Image: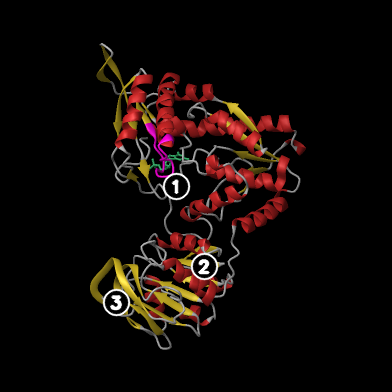
Amino acid sequence: PVLVVDFGAQYAQLIARRVREAGVYSEIVPHTMSAQALLAKEPAAIILSGGPSSVYAEGAPGMDAGLFEADVPVLGICYGFQIMAQALGGTVGRTGTREYGNTQARVEAGCGLFTGTPAQQAVWMSHGDAVQAAPTGFVVTASTEQTPVAAFEDRARRLYGLQWHPEVLHSEHGQAALVNFLRHEAGIAADWTPGSIIDEQVARIREQVGDAHVICGLSGGVDSSVAAALVHRAVGDQLTCIFVDHGLLRAGEREQVETDYAEGMGIRVIAVDETDRFLGALAGVTEPEAKRKIIGREFIRSFEAAQRRVVEEVGAAGGEIRFLVQGTLYPDVVESGGGDGAANIKSHHNVGGLPEDLDFELIEPLRELFKDEVRAIGRELGVPEKIVARQPFPGPGLGIRVIGEVTAENLRILRAADAIAREELSAAGLDAEIWQCPVVLLADVRSVGVQGDGRTYGHPVVLRPVSSEDAMTADWTRLPYDVLARISTRITNTVPEVNRVVLDCTSKPPGTIEWE
Ligand code: XMP
């Protein structure tokens, strides 16, 4: 693999993604790994990421110079560039001026990283310290007005450095620089393609599973769908998917899952209707975290019950099922400190996430993949576009979009309003532009209105359209007024309990995407 050494900040994941976009497999590793341990992984190349530290800060992470003597191509980016300079005997200075944002770089003709790119290019910078003198043996290959040494390389030793961030789109020819490094300078073949990933995973799954039976909890979302399709490609009829209908789904969702998977993809799906169980457990509950906990707990119970049904209906060998498919993605692995361990730890609140003490061996065929790769693989596997391109929907479903008590009546009202909003957004061609648009029913709130010739005292619904890259941050989407007007008019005309439609114009932070 190409190893991306994570020096903190947000950049390592993005670099790893860009490397894969270049058709080369990459893995993120923490900077606490020794040079020896890094080299033991037999990397095809190493990229040192940017990071928030100053090389002068106390305890600032560094890199053992031995890394640069192992005849492995290395690219240092931003902080990684400065570490490289320092480790090899160059000088890094505190210039006192911060260079931040877009600037113009002049690059030298005939150097390795910038082959085929223009002499002047827009680059994105974010640094306080700067390399003042390149180490012996290196040539300086780029400069900006404020930074005379903005890139260097020693092609004989295959060592390269860039002060700017090639991984962000603001650096016009950043991807070209990465491709030059990986393919031309390091000589790595571009063989990380959806087809090759599928072949490798299929072989791996077959070996793991043998002729045993496998179950998969299907949520209807992209990850579990692609994971199921991949396992189905590997073991066919040995797979049974379980779809728990918790009664908190949107209009038509369960029917859609049943037709899409069974008819469209030939996958056996056992759908269980657990509406009564969930609504019973949620009766009288209004506190958001309490709702989430109840839904998570009941989900596990439903899943266990369904599993017993699979054993009965499919007659799994030995009366037990050992394997469970999960759609865990690489960012989840990195963020929860799994794999080789990274810095920031975040707990995931996925209702599909089953507890550890469930006695299964996990099959996680997407564990090494980013979301865009999962989509590409899904398409290659023939998963219908409407599933592959689906917007995120939270595991707890409409249960966290009814503010107040989750009753069958409140769910019916919300479902009707939500269906209209989704229909109009699709009709306006906005699905690809928005990340998702929760519709929230304020069941606890009533306001006075007038309709026909009478007074109404109904509930508001909130439209929450957001644009986002990864749901960690989001901006509210500036939907066209005419689309908002159509949604509002249709909802208030056809859902009698709703007499007001309001727009949530809050970004994240400070608001989260969901209301609960
Ligand atoms: P928030 O509300 O935290 O949502 O800004 C971020 C993204 O996560 C989705 N979401 C969930 N997804 N289980 C899920 O599978 C959950 O419990 C859950 N809560 C929020 C939300 O729809 C948004 O895309």
Q: Quadrant of residue 359?
A: top right
The residue that disc 1 covers is: 347
Where is residue 352? Give x, y as percent: 53, 39
Q: Amino acid at mark 3?
A: Thr
Where is residue 273? Give x, y as percent: 57, 25
Mark with earlier residue (2, 3)? 2
Instruction: Decide whether the magenta segment is chiefly helix, strand or loop.
Output: loop
Magenta segment boundaries in residue numbering: 427-439
* Label 3: which secondary element: loop
* Label 1: which secondary element: loop
Q: Residue at the spot x=59%, y=62% of the render?
A: 192
Q: Amino acid at mark 2?
A: Leu
Judge from the rendering whether residue 452 lies leftward or rightward of residue 88; answer left or right: left
From mark 2 to mark 3, how far is it between C-alphas? 28 Å
The residue that disc 2 covers is: 3
Where is residue 393? Give x, y as percent: 46, 38
* Label 2: which secondary element: strand
Q: Tag 2: Cα neighbours inside 10 Å, few (<14), some, or many (≥20)?
A: many
Mark with earlier residue (1, 2)? 2
Q: Tag 3: Cα neighbours inside 10 Å, few (<14), some, or many (≥20)?
A: some
| Quadrant (top left/top right/bottom left/bottom right) for the N terminus | bottom right
Q: Residue at the spot x=47%, y=69% of the render?
A: 178
From mark 1 to mark 2, how far is it between C-alphas? 25 Å
The residue that disc 3 covers is: 147
Where is 98 relative to 445, above or below?
below
Q: Quadrant of ligand 1?
A: top left
